[in-house]
Amino acid sequence: MLVRMLVRTVLFTVLLGIVSLTASAQPDLKFDERVWDFGHVGIGFKLKHDFIIYNVSSNSHTIDSFAVGCDCSKVRLSDSTLGPGDTARIALIFETTNIYGPTNKSLMVHTSYGGLGQHIFYYQALVGQWIKGFRPEPISMFFLPGHKNKKLKFTNNFMDGISLVGVYPYDGSFVARTLSDRADKGEQIVLDIGPSPDLPAGTHESCVTLEFKIDTIEKPFKITIPIKSVHY
């Protein structure tokens, strides 16, 4: 009996150790996010977002392949090899041509990581639809050489009150400055948008995602505005 008890105790201790190791084990690859919401967008535009993969281990991994679920999307990869501490940027380009209404898409990435080699990222949008007419003016922004900053406006015609609670630029190719972050009924939320002063020569396609909060609705919503700059 004593021997059996000792054996059970040893087995139980070993099992506890295995469970503890499993629970404390951390995956080699981590991510900022698995889902990105572009929110409300116009029809016929090109939008961008980057999904980032971090290698937080002492092992090297590779990104073997990736695939998108429709012709409306393309992906560019910054680097297929992830050494210890490295990051890889998966640049998504999503075009809203021939799309209307709510859309949900996915991006699948295959890596050499044995713990979990397949990773799925999701992105979504509401194309060509706006909450009670609350839409950007203009719906997209285009800057030619010599163009100065332009105003991006949102008129609140029907809601009691709405606030701008987040500004998420895709990159540093432009500067966005908030002039008015709240609009009661009949008022406007206004931003000042312009090309970055240190923008290199070339054509730059970018976007900015803005997050809004309606006073009477708990959940915020987003609007994404495409921005294109031509610089000599």
Image (cartoon, helix red, strand yellow):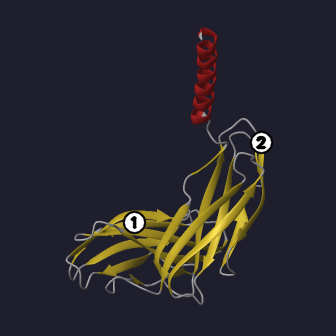
- Image quadrant of residue 6? top right
Please name the residue shown 20% across and 80% down the image: 185
Q: Earlier in the sequence, mark 2 or mark 1?
A: 2
Residue 60: x %, y % from top left = 77, 42
Asked if labels 1 and 2 touch by Cβ distance under 8 angstroms, the answer is no
Please name the residue shown 64% across and 10% down the image: 3
Which mark's residue is nearer the viewer, 2 or 1?
2
The extreme top residue here reads: 2
Q: How many marks?
A: 2
Please name the residue shown 58% across and 26% down the image: 16
- Kind of residue at disc 2: Ser
The extreme bottom residue here reads: 98
Instruction: Find residue 177 and name its label.
Output: 1
Badge 1 crowding class, 10 Å Cα cut-off, few under 14, some 14 to 19, many 20 or more, is few
Badge 2 crowding class, 10 Å Cα cut-off, few under 14, some 14 to 19, many 20 or more, is some
Q: Which residue is mark 2?
A: 60
Residue 120: x %, y % from top left = 64, 62
Q: Is residue 178 visible?
A: yes
Q: Is residue 7 above or below residue 168?
A: above
